[in-house]
Image (cartoon, rainbow, N blue to C red):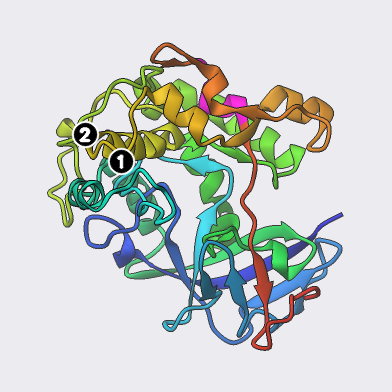
């Protein structure tokens, strides 16, 4: 059984769009921490202070300290995904023989612009406004993450994965609030417990009644607006932020597909693109019934029918891309 890590910190509200760049897809919520910010409860109840993360380093897609130079940790809100406010595809691998210098240049030129989805701006503003009801400038928060070992805490991008709580007595769980208000889709990972998935399924049922991202959800992956781009600093224009959107995970892969197709690096359909880059996932019902080690592994491409994707966000559980965490000497951190 996993223990519970608690992080106490402060959120600077200026980080959120349009004043900053943080958005409601919650992959870059910065929480400022200090001495005594971390505590661990092996039984989930009795917390004791721990400093094991003070100089910890995450090794995943890159190598970086858990706490940055500004005494902040980056938090990924577990189990949810909101429409993208700004997304740029990653660089092309040098090992790919089809990537000629001219194609790489064309790709980099087209990929320089960050793309967004409809409702990405609106969802971000809604979240920031809600957080603003608890204070001005900065607000106190707590982050909770069910883990057994320190090395399980962060994802491959070095983000602490957990639930963010704010407000009086930290009663508001932001993950659940965004989902229940219809500003975010549930997006499950294999690292989540059945209880955590069920909680967000219930919140998503309420969110669907609100409309918002659910009313805009489309299964048509052929829709792509290259001129729908990130607008740094605004202006806020909610009436121009309405339109169909696909599941954010599909959108991020769609951007990569469009960039590679433009540069003639990839020739084929979007389904072909997904098949060539198999993302492992599970059907949620099978995952809950059979468990991680027994549920059949699926691929996103198998849910495509022509240009349409046959599953909704809550129907899938994605395989978590794990990292590891070490101390300054490079030794894996086993205990809190």
In depth, the one of 234 and 289 nearer the eye is 289
Q: Secondary structure at mark 1?
A: helix
Q: Nearer the viewer, residue 197 or 212?
A: 197
Residue 210, horizontal then vertical, whole percent: 42, 25
Residue hosting label 2: 241
Q: Are marks 2 and 1 in contact (CB under 8 Å)?
A: yes
Q: Is residue 60 left or right of residue 194?
A: left
The answer to whether one can see residue 179 in this image is yes
Task: Identify the secondary structure beneath mark 2.
Answer: loop
Residue 212, placed above or below residue 308: below
Can the viewer see residue 87 in this picture?
no
Q: Residue at x 77, y 76 (%)?
A: 336
Mark linked to residue 280: none
- The residue segment tinted magenta is 310-316
Q: Which residue is mark 1?
A: 120
> Does 197 appear above or below 70?
above
- Which quadrant is home to the N terminus? bottom right
Going 65% across and 79% down the picture, which residue do you hit? 53
Answer whether residue 312 is magenta in the image.
yes
């Amino acid at each position: 059984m996993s223990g519970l890590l608690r992080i106490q910190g402060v959120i600077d509200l200026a980080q959120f769009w349009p004043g900053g760049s943080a958005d409601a897809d919650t992959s870059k919520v910065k929480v400022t921490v200090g001495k005594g910010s971390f505590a661990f409860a092996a039984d989930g109840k009795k917390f004791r202070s721990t400093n094991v993360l003070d100089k910890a380093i995450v090794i995943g897609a890159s190598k970086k300290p858990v706490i940055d130079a500004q005494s902040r940790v980056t938090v990924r809100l577990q189990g949810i995904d909101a429409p993208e406010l700004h997304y740029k595809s990653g660089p092309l691998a040098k090992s790919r023989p089809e990537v000629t210098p001219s194609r790489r240049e064309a790709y980099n030129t087209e990929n320089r612009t960050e793309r967004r989805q409809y409702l990405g701006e609106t969802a971000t503003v809604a979240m920031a406004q809600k957080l603003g009801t608890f204070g001005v400038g900065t607000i106190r928060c707590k982050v909770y993450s069910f883990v057994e070992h320190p090395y399980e805490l962060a994802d491959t991008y070095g983000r602490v994965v957990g639930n963010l709580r704010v407000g009086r007595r930290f009663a508001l769980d932001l993950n659940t609030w965004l989902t229940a208000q219809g500003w975010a889709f549930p997006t499950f990972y294999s690292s989540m417990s059945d209880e955590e998935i069920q909680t967000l399924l219930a919140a998503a049922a309420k969110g669907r009644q609100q409309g918002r991202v659910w009313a805009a959800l489309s299964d048509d992956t052929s829709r792509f607006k290259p001129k729908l781009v990130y607008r740094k600093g605004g202006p806020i224009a909610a009436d121009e932020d309405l339109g169909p959107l696909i599941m954010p995970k599909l959108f991020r892969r769609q951007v990569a597909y469009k960039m590679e197709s433009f540069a003639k690096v990839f020739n084929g359909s979007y389904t072909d693109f997904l098949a060539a880059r198999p993302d492992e996932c599970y059907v949620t019902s099978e995952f809950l019934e059979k468990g991680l080690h027994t549920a059949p592994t699926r691929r996103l491409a198998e849910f495509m029918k022509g240009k349409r994707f046959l599953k909704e966000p809550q129907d899938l559980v994605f395989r978590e891309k794990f990292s590891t965490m070490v101390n300054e000497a490079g030794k894996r951190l086993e205990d809190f």
